[in-house]
Amino acid sequence: MSDNVIALENREGPFQDMLARVLAMVPDNEREDRDLVRLLAFRLELDGEAAVIEYLVRHITDYIKQGSSGTLHDFIQQSMAG
């Protein structure tokens, strides 16, 4: 990663506590997906914890209802594109 890019998921302080609470909602098998963590960290920085939790709940619910076979990150990316 370039020195000019800030890895949001590596920020110190209260941000880590908020990110941990958001990631606690992610299915266990998806928590190690670095792309998903970065996406959620970015959204958390922009929108705040409550909005990201609402966003994540909506996407996880749709992900489960549709029986998607891909990753949660891919599902979210596809929903943002379409």
Image (tube, rainbow, N blue to C red):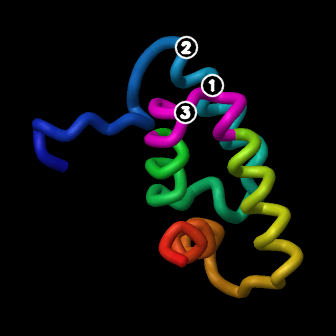
Q: Are marks 3 and 1 in contact (CB under 8 Å)?
A: no
**Three-letter amino acid code at disc 2?**
Pro
* Residue placed most toward the observer, 77 or 29: 77
> Whole-percent x and y of residue 56?
71, 51
x 78%, y 45%: residue: 25
Residue 60, compared with residue 3, is above or below; it is: below
Residue 27, compared with residue 37, is above or below; it is: below
Relative to residue 48, is residue 28 drawn left or right? right
Relative to residue 10, is residue 66 drawn left or right? right
x 73%, y 40%: residue: 53
Magenta highlight: main SS: helix
Q: Are marks 2 and 1 in contact (CB under 8 Å)?
A: yes
18 part of magenta stretch: no
Check residue 18 in the rendering and tell me which mark sits there, or answer none.
Answer: 1
Assign a secondary structure to mark 2.
Answer: helix
Q: Quadrant of the C terminus?
A: bottom right
Relative to residue 76, is residue 5 drawn left or right? left
**Three-letter amino acid code at disc 3?**
Asp
Determine the image quadrant of residue 42: top left
* Residue placed most toward the observer, 24 or 82: 82
> Whole-percent x and y of residue 29?
71, 64
Q: Which residue is mark 2?
A: 14
| Range shown magenta | 42-52
Assign a secondary structure to mark 1.
Answer: helix
> Whole-percent x and y of residue 5?
19, 40
Check residue 47 in the rendering and tell me which mark sits there, or answer none.
Answer: 3
Which circle's residue, 2 or 3, is located before the other in the chain? 2
Few, some or many residues within 10 Å of mark 2 (<14, 14–19, 20+)? few
